[in-house]
Image (cartoon, rainbow, N blue to C red):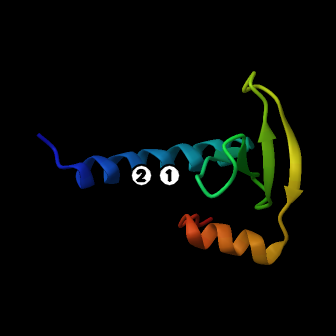
Amino acid sequence: MRKLTEIQAIGSIAVKKLRESKLEKGLPFMINTRSLPSNQAYLEYPNGSISIVQIFKSAYDFTLVKQLDTNEIQAVRSRYHLYK
């Protein structure tokens, strides 16, 4: 049986590959986190910008809550180890 840390590492690698793939295809990548309210997430765009969005129950619709500035983007990238 695999240890929890090994499973977490495998999951982390898979998410990073998915992020990379979506951004390369010109699609945004959603970053869910407990540091935001449960109906909000970060949305990272291929151009490097990051927004906070509110997600609606349909999960197919969202609205912009805030466009992050350069310092906020750097803080999010650092916190979640997101490198371009």
- Image quadrant holding the N terminus, namely top left
For this rendering, which residue is in front, 14 or 72? 72
Q: Quadrant of residue 49?
A: bottom right
Q: Which residue is mark 1?
A: 16
Residue 13 percent across, percent down from the top left:
41, 51
Question: Where residue 12 is drawn, which disc sits there?
Answer: 2
Residue 26 percent across, percent down from the top left:
75, 43
Residue 35 percent across, percent down from the top left:
62, 58
Q: Is residue 72 above or below residue 38?
A: below
- Image quadrant holding the C terminus, namely bottom right
Q: Residue at x 74, y 25 (%)?
A: 57
Q: Is residue 63 above or below residue 5?
A: above
Q: Quadrant of residue 76?
A: bottom right
Q: Is residue 4 left or right of residue 69?
A: left
Dot 2: within a 10 Å radius of its alpha carbon, few (fewer than 14), some, or many (20 or more) residues?
Answer: few
Dot 1: within a 10 Å radius of its alpha carbon, few (fewer than 14), some, or many (20 or more) residues?
Answer: some
Q: How many marks?
A: 2
Distance between the alpha carbons at the discs numbered 1 and 2: 6 Å
Helix, strand or loop at label 2? It is helix
Tell me the kind of residue under disc 1.
Lys
Residue 66 percent across, percent down from the top left:
87, 57
Q: Residue at x 53, y 43 (%)?
A: 18
Q: Is residue 73 above or below residue 3?
A: below
Question: In the image as oriented, which residue stretches furthest toward the front?
Answer: 37
Question: Where residue 41 is drawn, which disc sits there?
Answer: none
Q: Is residue 1 left or right of residue 41?
A: left
Q: Residue at x 87, y 50 (%)?
A: 65
Tell me the kind of residue under disc 2.
Ser
**Is the residue under label 2 in contact with that under label 1 (CB below 8 Å)?**
yes
Q: Nearer the viewer, mark 1 or mark 2?
A: 2
For this rendering, which residue is in front, 34 or 27? 34
Question: In the image as oriented, which residue stretches furthest toward the top?
Answer: 58
